[in-house]
Amino acid sequence: MNAYDVIKRPVITEKNTFLMDQGQYTFEVDPKSTKHDVKAAVEEIFKVNVLAVNTINVPSKVKLKRRRGGRPIVGRTSSWKKAIVKLAPGQRIEIFEGV
C-alpha cells in the first residue's frame, strides 16, 4: 500500500495538541491499514523514527436532523480509523508546528 494512501490527514484537537508536546501525533488512516503500514508510512513521509503505534476504530454515530412539522431525518456519520504515533525522543513533525 502506498504511504500516501495509508495516511489520510492529521487529527487536530485539544487533546491531540497536548499529546504533541509528549511526542505523540494523531492521524486519520485507511481502515484496512495495519500498525506496520502506519509506521512505515509515517517514517517514509516525515523522515522520523517511530517507536510505537496505537490504532483505534472510531465507530459511526447516529445523527438526527429535525424538520419542522415532520418526521426527523435519521443519518449516520462515517466510521473511521485513527492512529496515535509515538516518535523517538527529540524528533518532531513540522507540519504540526504552530497549531
Image: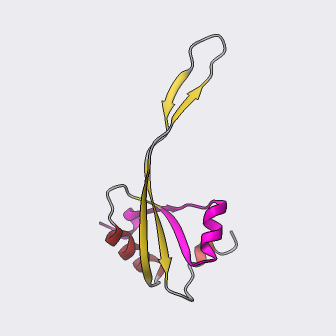
Q: Position of residue 59 (x, y in %)?
A: 44, 45
Whether residue 5 is in magenta: the answer is yes
- Image quarter where the N terminus lies is bottom left
59 relative to 97, above or below: above
Q: Position of residue 93 (x, y in %)?
A: 56, 78
For this view, does 77 lie left or right of residue 31? right
Q: Position of residue 24 (x, y in %)?
A: 54, 74
Q: Quadrant of residue 3?
A: bottom left
Total marks placed: 0
Give the residue furthest to the top.
Answer: 69
71 relative to 16, above or below: above
Give the residue furthest to the right.
Answer: 98
Q: Position of residue 92 (x, y in %)?
A: 57, 82
Q: Residue at x 57, y 19 (%)?
A: 72
For this view, does 77 lie left or right of residue 35? right
Q: Residue at x 42, y 79 (%)?
A: 43
For this rendering, which residue is in front, 72 or 10?
A: 72
Tell me the magenta residue range: 1-27
